[in-house]
Image (spheres, coloured by chain):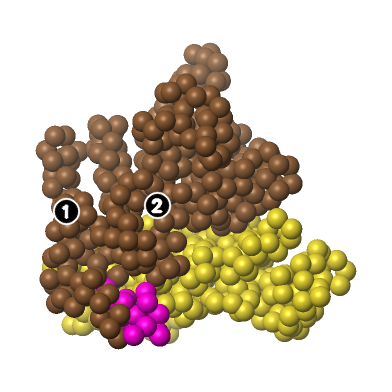
Chain colours: A yellow, B brown
Amino acid sequence: METQIAVNKPAIVSESRFREFIARFMASSSAMIGLCLLIVMVFCAVFAPVLAPYDPYASDLPNSLQAPSVAHLLGTDELGRDILSRILYGARISLLVGVEAVTLALIFGVILGAVAGFYGGKADTIIMGIMDIMLSFPSILLAIAFMTVLGRGLDKAVIAIGIVSIPHYARIVRGSVLSVKENVYVMAARAIGNSDRRLIFVHILPNVLAPIIVRATIGVSVAILEAAALGFLGLGVQPPTAEWGTMLGSGRQTIFNAPHIVTFPGVAITITVMAFNLLGDGLRDVLDPRLK
Amino acid sequence: MGKYILRRLLLLIPVLFGVSLATFVVMHSFTTDPATIILGEHATVDRVEALREELGLNKPIYVQFSDYLGNTLSGDLGKSVITKTSISAELMKRFPATVELAVSAVCIASVLGLILGIVSAVKQNTVLDYGAMGVALLGVSMPIFWLGLMMIILFSVTLGWLPASGRITIGMAPDTITGLYLLDALLTGNMEALWDAFRHLLMPALALGSYSTAIIARMTRATMLETIRQDYVRTARAKGLKESVVIVKHALRNALIPIVTVIGLQMGALLGGAVLTETVFSWPGIGSYVVEGIMVSDYPRVQGAVLLIGTIFVMVNLIVDILYSYLDPRIQHS
């Protein structure tokens, strides 16, 4: 009987922790507003083919540069394409770039930070030295430099933004690993013969997840802003793909006679970035109140 | 303190070497030959070879890096492959424009950020607090280049109050002393140029400073909320001091160190934002020089400008670190 209770205990603790997390999350207005906004954006992205009133790539030159009207709720661009449809399809690209770039940065950042923090010594000096040099450049400038090297396009924008974000994650993970690795449970796990890899991935990383999750959520907003900036400069996603930054870049030419072209894609970027920022702020308060 | 500064200055050598190496490695990792990119795919082999010779691309990579490092140390960043002009000279000419923009943006962001943060903290959980933090949230969420475009639509296209681009009206530039138009116009007493330069600067500086305003406002609120709950603030109130004196002299003064640090760090971050703001407002600084260089595949130009911005970024962060330890004597440096 006692054995049965002992076996079930961790499951009960884990379940109550999850319930506590959900209760605190739902009590955070910041997190809830962010989540609701994000759900709306994801819904728009997933159901863009259903929601979009027109083909986002279909030119209609006689109707170019039309102001918002009943036929075209957000107006048309220089080629007569419906801006609302392009913004809906653009949500797919922006969310995809944000999540993919952060995933890339997370994979490398977590591994590099964990190795540097866990092993220390030369590995730490070399890895963090490279990370510090990368942090010596404003990230958007470094992303621009990488785009110059990699060439233009969606996948290359993801790689460039992902690479410049790696040092941020590596730093956070290294710091957290350094503080956790001296804990008694890690020493106990080492004493019973666990390998280094198991120590890092099973015993240490799950205990440093909170700051990583918070940074990754806010990191998506930064990645979306950087992708839009690259698109605006003509370095990111290439026309005619419906991407918000690219739409702003091409709409800039007609700003004096059709300002609506640059207005709405910017609103879409702001709302999406705000959603991730609110969610990140809320998660920070919920997961680690000390970070507030 | 002296030892700490000396140590930090010595540490600058490997960091700047790393910055140079990183710039060189990134710019030389072209999957396609730079000479082919510059001349186009249809260029003859002879022309490509001649350009490769001119750019020194036929030499072994370590020789290229050593040449590049030697030239950089002597202040020579090479020549633009398009205009054939000296990159160092062009960067020096454009440097004051970027400095003027970034410094103005930091000043605007500091004033606005402090006001928003103080109001928000003092009136915690009121409409004013929510409003101020809402503005800050917008500041970190809006792309600065989009904010710039919106300002042009409102203040230039619709209202016609401010010029949409450039640094000063042609023919109105003041005599050059520092290269900073506002300062030069003041020093030479040219009020017409001062007003014109100010009107050109206002929108780019506001747009560039928007993100920093938000960061400074958030930091000010957080630190002010901590200090206004301290005993010495309660004591100041109990003594019957005016609320404004309590807030400014007792609470804000003690909250300033982290705020000043954030302001300093924003100065470096603004250099990145300048690339976008200068492009939107056709501001003739280093940022627009980089973007123009990328558009015409002028890679020595991009390399030179990226190296310069990276170096300034490192120097600014170093100055902030040193100032931080100077402002807060509790920080010990072993």
Q: Chain of mark 2?
A: B
Q: Chain of mark 1?
A: B
Q: Is residue A104 left or right of residue B280?
A: left
Q: Is residue B124 above or below residue A147?
A: above
Tell me how far mark 1 sits from mark 2, CA to CA: 20 Å
Image point (55%, 20%), residue name = B244
Q: Earlier in the sequence, mark 1 or mark 2?
A: 1
Query: How many residues crowd mark 2 within 10 Å: few (<14), some (14–19), many (20+)?
Result: many
Query: Residue B73 has which mark?
Result: 1
Quadrant housing residue B145: bottom right
Residue that label 2 marks? B286
* Rendering coords of residue B214 (x, y %): 53, 46
Query: How many residues crowd mark 1 within 10 Å: few (<14), some (14–19), many (20+)?
Result: few
What amino acid is labelled 2 in the image? Ile
Task: Please say whether residue B226 is visible from this viewpoint.
Answer: no
- Whether residue B209 appears in magenta in the rendering, the answer is no
Viewer-nearest residue: B294 or A279: B294
